[in-house]
Image (tube, grey):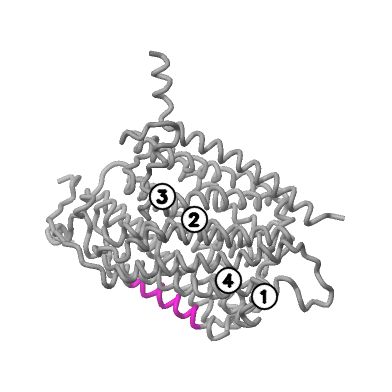
Amino acid sequence: MSDNNQKEKMHAPGSFVIALIFLAWFMTVYFTQWLALSKNWTVY
Amino acid sequence: MDLSIISNQFRTCPTTGLKVHMPAQRLVWINAVSAVVFLLLGGVLALLLALTRWPAVHLLPQDLFYRFITAHGASMLLFWITFFEMAGIVFAVQTILGARYPGIKFAWFNYILMITGAIMTEVVIFMGKADVTFTAYPPLKAHPAFYLGIILFAVGALFNCFQFIYALVVAKREGWHQGSLPLFVFGMLVAVIIAIFTLVSGAAAFIPAFLWSIGLIGSVDPEYYRITFWGFGHSAQQLNLAAMVSIWYLLANLTTGAQPVNQRMCRLAFVLYLFGINLGSIHHNLVDPGLSSTYRIFNTSYLFYAATLGSMIHAFSIPAAVEVAQRKKGLTRGLFQWLTNAPWSNPGFSGMVLSLIIFGFFGGPTGLILSVEQLNMLSHNNLRVPGHFHMTVVGGTTLAFMAVTYYVIPLVLQRKLIGEKLAKWQPYVFGLGVLMFTTGMHFAGVMGAPRRHWDVTFQNAVIQVPFDPAMYTMLALVGIGAIMAFTGLLMYVYVAVMSVFFGKKTETKMEPYMPQFAKN
């Protein structure tokens, strides 16, 4: 019974996974961009 | 106005059952058609510019490059998007809210102001009297008609914004509507409030520039102009954002029957836009002298992130709404059956999803990186910047506007679509093309390609600039992607124009309709 209730609480599990993929994507883009920019525009 | 006359001005949409106030229908038509004309003009110019960016082609001569980049910016960022949004706000009241649109003659007056201003601006640019690019930073000086055209256009749009708010007041007062506004209308209201700030800021930039161009004042302070211009230029993109997200909600509902899981949260996300987003404009001034570090960091970080939180809420809320609606239809297998079995051949749905992906996964993160002061120092004024805003404005806003057109034509303009097969493929061709050329711009910028420059590679410079060879590949990608995106644009224009002018007219069923919540 309690398991069923818990399942019902997650209305959109697929969207939740997409949101997690987005967060992982964002972190990757953010830090690789920082790295790429700093390498191409070196401050001497 | 006599209510008995107004009550006979409504028709019932046979598909949605919505009541449509007919006298405002021509307003939606004229604004939408004007928007598409400017989209086509801006698109042709975009192709020519992209082929100039591609060093192997380098199509345009120097003078035409700067002329066309000015006209492209004005056509796309100002005229295409604003005319479409004007159609959107009328549509929000006369169809979605089911209320009368008051002051039809005034709205036509506003349209005449806008179209006069737009034509005046375009003519002056093509005459070669305003090769100042879209930003027109002083001390670059254009012909007075350039500034006057933009001012006329902005005044017309501003009047329309006030009229929209007045229409909402009338809808409530006369009992056409009761309770909270539908989410789409609420989002458009947020867009209109941002638009008012935007247009006032634009007036603060362009009126002094106009006075300077006719010799009434001696100079315009460049820093003053840059701050007020970006209060206009960037905020205009924020109102696009609010309008685009509203359209996402509308399309999610029209294509899958999705209803937001938590409406209050969605409204809160729109309110976060209202309070957080405009100040993000200052990230254009991060490398300018005269502004304190505290001011820059506060405006580009702390308040800007409030708006980002709003976008994050929408980014989860819209897929979740679609997922819940799809699961109710029995598509419950695994995590993604609701997605794999979604109506991908419906251009309204595919356009919405592609717009969401290009905006959310590409445009958003690249913009947030630009809003960080240290990273902005590393990527300011290179091709990475237009790479970012083409992801948001073209891949996001324009694609969403295209997608909703496939519903506006049959439901509001009462014409059957011509070229439905073409329409099914259009979002994919356009979306993929945009993704290609924006990715090319983005990485070419990271490798040092400058923006707003006719000769990206500085071939004729006295001191040669060493570029990574990969940058040339990226610039070729800009050209190839632009050809593909332009093909998608032509497909859209063909379907829209043919349907609006030659599509079979659907039956109009006029039915008397009285305000449902009138007090007496």
Mark 1: give few (<14), some (14-19) or many (20+) Cα within 10 Å.
many
Q: Nearer the viewer, mark 4 or mark 1?
A: 1
| Residue B109 image-quadrant placement | bottom left
Distance from label 3 to label 1 (Cα)? 36 Å
Q: At label 4, which amino acid type do we have?
A: Phe
Q: Under tag 1, what secondary structure?
A: loop
Chain assignment, label 1: B
What type of secondary structure mainly makes up the magenta span?
helix
In the rendered view, tell whether residue B314 sits above or below residue B81: above
- The residue that label 1 is drawn on is B454
Q: At label 3, which amino acid type do we have?
A: Trp
What's the magenta region?
B109-123
State which tag comes first along the sequence, 2 or 1: 2
State which tag comes first along the sequence, 4 or 1: 4
- The residue that label 4 is drawn on is B134
- The residue that label 2 is drawn on is B396
Mark 4: give few (<14), some (14-19) or many (20+) Cα within 10 Å.
many
Q: Does residue B24 appear anywhere in the picture?
A: no
Q: Are marks 3 and 2 on the same chain?
A: yes
The answer to whether the residue labelled 4 contacts the one labelled 1, judged by CB atoms less than 8 Å apart, is: no
Q: Under tag 2, what secondary structure?
A: helix
Q: At label 2, which amino acid type do we have?
A: Gly
In the picture, measured across the screen, residue B494 lies left or right of residue B467, that is left
State which tag comes first along the sequence, 3 or 1: 3
- The residue that label 3 is drawn on is B248
